[in-house]
Image (cartoon, coloured by chain):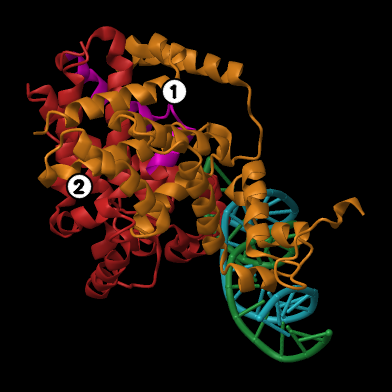
Chain colours: A red, B orange, C cyan, D green
Amino acid sequence: MATRSRRSERRNQVLSRERIIETAIELLDAGGEAAMTTRALTERLSTGSGAIYYRVGSRDDLLDAATETLVTAALAADPMAVSSLPEDEIRTVALALFDVIAEHPWLATRLIRQVVRKPFGTVTVGIFERIGRQVGALGVPRASWFDAASTLVHYILGAVSQNTAMEGDTPDGSHDRGAFLDATEAAWQNLAEDYPFMHAVASQMHAHDDREQFLTGIAVIVDGLTRLG
Amino acid sequence: MATRSRRSERRNQVLSRERIIETAIELLDAGGEAAMTTRALTERLSTGSGAIYYRVGSRDDLLDAATETLVTAALAADPMAVSSLPEDEIRTVALALFDVIAEHPWLATRLIRQVVRKPFGTVTVGIFERIGRQVGALGVPRASWFDAASTLVHYILGAVSQNTAMEGDTPDGSHDRGAFLDATEAAWQNLAEDYPFMHAVASQMHAHDDREQFLTGIAVIVDGLTRLG
DNA sequence: ACCTGAACACCGTTCAAGT
DNA sequence: ACCTGAACACCGTTCAAGT
């Protein structure tokens, strides 16, 4: 009786596209791409495999749909240009993407894939448009708008993807952050002579904050772009 | 008789790790990740599946090894700092990566994966070291070296990954570049009002050269970095 | 030490059949 | 229109057995 309040969108339809995507995201979050199988999905939804194909198509289509759902939500969730500075808008979009990937690590690979394979899909165009609108206000001459927006988008997606927590896909929870850092530390000693730079910044690596570094990178690029005139 | 000149590295060893990696790269180049299966590999090498596991380990290990082989070769192939300017060195490394991914599109996803999962592996450290050494000469203060190198690496890997040709993984050769651009053109009309920026730069998109745009991006970042002091 | 290849426990996808 | 679920054609990986 308590579970009766289900909005029946279209007569007696038990399975909605939304519910499939939602469940897929749960599986992906819990165990990475490898965990999102047709069988795991049909079991959770107590349905047949054909139903999923009927609603969303192939596994790949489902992954794309899940990506689109999360990215669209992430981009829509913020204040959206309350007459803010262009750099603030860029930062807002960038951090929204940073955070959604931090929450859903499997998105890193998928987002880049989406940009490559569907350059005119909702996701790609949505990000590009949002960023692109700001470059004019930044003082970038019109002829360089596309280059400027591309530079920002390439950096933002590259950085957020590369900052993904490494557990992401592997189900073996080797979270021993300590043991990992120790092994790293040991590895550095051998690298000292062949890799002077790595050795020199080793201490900065341990101290740094991904999010702040990300913002520094954006500031650097924005600064460079203002000089494109 | 003509094929007799095979260097027998270690007595009567028919299968070398190198030959497996080489064959894997061939399969990957021909049909993307999906085409590199254990069975395709064993068939081409006329061997059993166990032999591959004995030499290189899992499929994932093989993918990593193939990535490392290509990236290492790409980074080693150039002049390497003939007392050139730091920006030139950065450009050289960047273009080497750009080109190797253009030749092997499946590398895009794999390279980012490698950076995320093996932050202290040969590939990641190699790229970082190579780029990082230049930031000092660029005038970046020591305290910002790590941030500066990270910004460059994130941009470079992001840009080269996103510039990957879209056929990459799909075996269905839908290369109709013309039809694709037409569909794109049509899509733009509908976007005109909701996506003013996209509409404004549509002409620049068709004209632009990926490689040049990539270099513009690097110049922008280098410019921004020199002002970090 | 190195390789074989059958066997195992999975996959994604299709499609006749049901309602 | 929407869903079921058996069947198909694959996968990656293991491991006893061979040399």
Between residue B24 and residue B149, name the one nearer to us.
B149
Sequence-first tag of 2 and 1: 2
Q: Residue at x 33, y 63 (%)?
A: A167
* Residue A120 drawn in magenta: yes
As drawn, is B12 to the left or to the right of A161? Answer: right
Q: Which residue is painted at 39% across and 34% down in the image?
A: B82
Residue at mark 2: B146
Residue B103 in the image, given as x and y percentages of width and height: 57, 36
List x then y, in percent, for residue B172: 66, 36
User: Marks 2 and 1: which is nearer the front?
Assistant: 2
10 Å crowding of disc 2: few (<14), some (14-19), many (20+): many
- Of the pair A215 and B18, the residue shown nearer to us: B18
Give the structural element (helix, strand or loop) at label 2: helix
Q: Residue furthest right?
A: B1
The furthest residue to the front = B83
**The N terminus of chain B, quarter of image:** bottom right
Give the residue at mark 1: B210
Magenta range is A111-136
Any part of residue B107 in sight = yes
Chain of the residue that carries numbered disc 2 in the rendered image: B
Magenta-drawn stretch, dominant element (helix, strand or loop): helix
Chain to which the residue tagged by mark 1 belongs: B
